[in-house]
Amino acid sequence: MRYGRQIELTCLCSMKIAIEGCCHGELDKIYETIGYLEKREGVKVELLLCCGDFQAVRNESDMECMAVPVKYRMMQTFYKYYSGEKTAPVLTIFIGGNHEASNHLQELPYGGWVAPNIYYLGYAGVIRYRGIRIGGLSGIFKFCDYRKGHHEFPPYNPDTLRSVYHIRNIEVFKLKQIQMPIDIFMTHDWPRGIYYYGSTEELLRKKRFLRQEVESNTLGNPAAEELLTHLQPTYWFSAHLHVKFAAVMQHQPKDNAAPRVTKFLSLDKCLPYREFLQIVDVPERPGSSEGLEYDPEWLAILKATNSLQRTTPHPWNPPENNGLHQRWDFRASEADMMQVVEDLSGDLVIPDNFSRTVPPYDPGRPQPQSAPSYIINPQTTELCATLGLTDIYAQVGQGDDERRQGQSSTGGEEEEDEDGNSGGSVDEHSEYPTDTSGLSSSLNPDEITLEDEWIEEEAELKPAAVEDELPQVPMGEFHTPSHMVLPAPKYVSPIHLSTLMNLPPPSHSTPAADRTLYGAAREGPREGLREGGEEDATAARTLKRTSDETGNPGSRDDDSSLSSAVVHRSQAVVSLLSGSVPDLKLHRGVI
């Protein structure tokens, strides 16, 4: 077999982190792939980050809480790690996507262990591993649910089965209080506009149906776009679109500081001959703890914003400095962080307190008719008691009849609430006055092209979909075409807390994004699209379709043309990025 030359980084103290795209419950295959890579290249992967669609399905009732077509509801392999039959060989951290066992993840709104050595970041979260700050935001963006509280609980109705995984503005507001630098951040869907900072033409060759959304800048998550501008992490990892895409974004400098650079990478889903796994070399910070640790700044933000939590479907806007709110700045002070450390008795190590809350799946005794479970997780109870937080899952589940009636009527409220004249801030308008999610065929594949994801998957598993030039893989070994080693991130020297307290206040209510860089970047790619586009732009929307809540396919105008648009061949050769991002290099290999 021939492999491309691997670019080795000389770093005195670095660790290898594996990044995985959409997991879809395939933990066995992912861990086998990592093991094969470690053996073949003589390396040790210290950490695995999964970018959503994790599918932490414990038993049959959990599958009832997952938004996928009924015929595609499969147990997969997570239950083995939940039951103790297997143990994750690599410490695993993940965020939620739009195909999840939502009742399970709702037990851990602030994060926690879903199995030994497998940690969920919660609706939003920041933790530390060997001194590296890792943050994430679970779910996908949908405007009509963005301003609501976390009001859903099982058993879900057809509306809440979907809305439960939609991002809420309270989580984005919390993340915008962060002042200290973030090393790694994860979202399931892409930040809007990131495609202008990589090889846009290569992306559109792989996903031709995205052309209209890219050219109109309606592809992706507008809230994540603004978090990217605010947080400016060294790395940002995503998934969702089932394609490998890399980009490098240089941010506008803040004050007199040097401009920061974010390296973005999105990966595919876990399938043979798909680019779903990559390796990143990240420098460690000397003297840091070996295990997972709580982040004092993040916990202080959770405490400060606890009173803002909502568990109703009524729209709400976060407080702003506009004369209507007594407090709008919820940044953590040094004293706030020290109080968190005191609350934890000086021990920031995340306790290994996983416990099973429901019986695991037993292949010998299937229970296909079991009802979805609503369980309070003792991990959340313990954290809330320690820090004085509210277990919002317990609160919504124990609510009165009015709240339960509100859940059943969720689907009919969005349109009249979009004007921003109701809810907690009656005179404030939404930060996103236009629902761009309705223009996108990629933001909500469960609602538009859900079945197409599995149609594509089945077709690409056929031998005919594999190009002749793909390397041969020994029988029984799982394979992904390549992995990537990114350059070492540019770290600013450590900053004392007292210095950080003097940083300018963040924008608290999702202000309009600065379009300067986006506009400059957009002109180049768009010009290239007009000159180098092979297909007609009018054909870009041929694949939009609908599906009902039971998973039955909706109508399609042209079955054959849709299939040809959706079922594409896997990419056999990894293309190098364009000259605009020379410091991000790929190499070919089989793992």
Image (cartoon, rainbow, N blue to C red):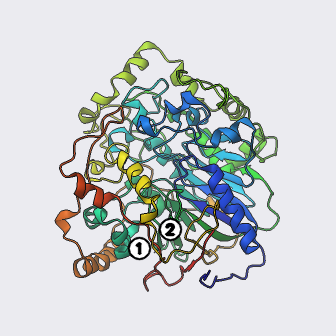
Across and down, in percent, residue 153 comes to 49, 26
Residue 441 left/right relative to 181 = left
Residue 384, given in percent of the width and then of the height, sits at 67, 32
**Residue 492 versus residue 294 in the image, above or below:** below
> Which mark is on residue 110?
none
Question: Can the viewer see residue 517?
Answer: no
Residue 164 visible to an observer of this rendering: yes
Q: Residue at x 43, y 59 (%)?
A: 460
Secondary structure beneath label 1: helix
Q: Give residue 197's mark.
A: 1
Q: Amino acid at mark 1?
A: Tyr
Measure how far apart labels 1 and 2 are at the Cα level. Answer: 9 Å
Q: Label 2: which residue? A: 264
Query: In the rendered image, which quarter is residue 3 located in?
Result: bottom right
Q: Quadrant of the C terminus?
A: bottom right
Name the quadrant of the N terminus. Answer: bottom right
Give neighbour class at mark 1: few <14, some 14-19, many 20+ (Cα, 10 Å): many
Q: Three-letter amino acid code at disc 2?
A: Phe
